[in-house]
Amino acid sequence: MQVGLARRTLTPFGLWVFGAAASAPVVVLSGGIVATYATTKVTALPLAFVLVAGTVALLAVGYAAMARQLGHPAAYYGILAHGLGRSWGVAAGMVALVAYNGIQISLYGLFGATMAAHLGGTWWVWAGLALVLVGVLGVRAIVLSTRALAIVLAVSLLIVAAFVLAGVGQPAAGKVSWDGFHASGLAASGVGGAVAFCIAAFMGVDAPGSLVEEAVDRKSVGRATIGGVLLLGGVYAVAAFAMGAAVGPDVVGDVAADPAAGLPFSVLARLGGWWAALANVVLIFAIVTSMLAFHSVLARYVFAMAREKVLPASLAHSNSATRVSAPRHGSLMQTTVAVAVVAVLAFSGADPVAVMFTWLSALGAMGLLCLLLAASVAAMTAPASARGPQAGAWEWRLAPALGVLGGSVVLALMVGNAGSLLGAAPGSLYPFLLPVILLATAVAGGVWAGHLRRARPEVYVGIGRGTPKRHAVPDAMNLSI
């Protein structure tokens, strides 16, 4: 009897909510866009968001096509196992675990620092409370998490819309400037750093691929992923444009770098002081729901890889012999890892934003971009059995090829400008630890796969092939029959 995740429990809207909530629009507005302007001084940030969104959307085409066809909860692991080989799959799975953990755990630092700034206390105490909340919700059925994410996401988008209205409705010098969309603004020296920040804003939109086993309709994975990238790209571009219009594109970098300016909340206050207060509250909830979304994806990676015995089989243990409403042990493992990392950083006295949030989120963003690139290559090289009978040239050849070309440029810019992304001193070699960590993780995954091939060939053969057959797991709607 095969154990699987609860089938047909996530609607197309639910899939989209997970991807968009993981990206956290209000967090990008209040943190990412402000920090990008402040650090890079690039006035054409809105145009950069449009270009990066197009690149990520192209990369997502092959990823979504493979995820839809394979139906594997550990999406990158399954995609590379079928498209490039089993050893590549294990390497991708390990990198995904590091990358998703990096992003998810980084948010505890941001949450702790935000709460301490508003209510006082020590950041790691607030982070500990968030750990408990996410841990409790993570072992519950995914429908509960989806409802929480949908509510916070809806209010977050309302906040962003209000910010745009305030910025464009009351522009600097009484006139809206369109300099943010002028290509000449991309000639600035900080454009590489701006691109790196932009790509980090989209991390999480690939979450629907890991929820495919629970989806009502597998085809909706592609629509949720690619649609999410395009919609969020538009939201971020318009928000960045509104910020430039509100204070003036020629000075927005200096204003963003000044904490006393209070961006973006000072712009929201133009509509009334309660808008800024609401945005601060929603920011806190958005950080938590983003953590919950990444936590859910991680739990499914652990469950799926343990189900195939690439990770310890006990991590796939369930009270049910056939149907898992939530991957409980995978969830508990992620919570344990998060507790350990937060404890170490708190004990070492690390800054929760400058070190914990910035470095870990950059590690995660770089790792997930590498995985998207690898997934596009896997889509182009996948055998006919993995593509399905209705494989089209756009999904399996053209879009992935264009995505690899554009994504390679973005990755090069991201690695080359890692120092500005992390706020490191010029000439420092520390930023290059990020690609070294990812490469070492991938190599370790390949070595582990080689060990499995020699010592446990039956496990090696099953890598990426452990999803239950269509009728092995009962539908949620049929459980009471």
Image (cartoon, rainbow, N blue to C red):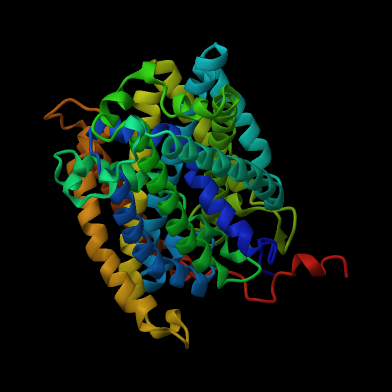
Q: Is residue 411 visible?
A: yes
Residue at 24% over, 45% down: 414
- Residues 463 and 116: in front is 116
Looking at the image, the residue that sits furthest to the bottom is 389
Looking at the image, the residue that sits furthest to the right is 481
Where does residue 248 sit, x and y in percent of width and height?
30, 32
Looking at the image, the residue that sits furthest to the top is 121
In this rendering, would 411 be left or right of 294? left
Where does residue 357 sit, x and y in percent of width and height?
40, 30
Residue at 33% over, 39% down: 362
Where does residue 70 sit, x and y in percent of width and height?
50, 72
Q: Is residue 381 visible?
A: no
- Residues 432 and 257: in front is 257
Residue at 50% over, 36% down: 337
Q: Quadrant of the C terminus?
A: bottom right
**How many numbered markers are drawn?**
0
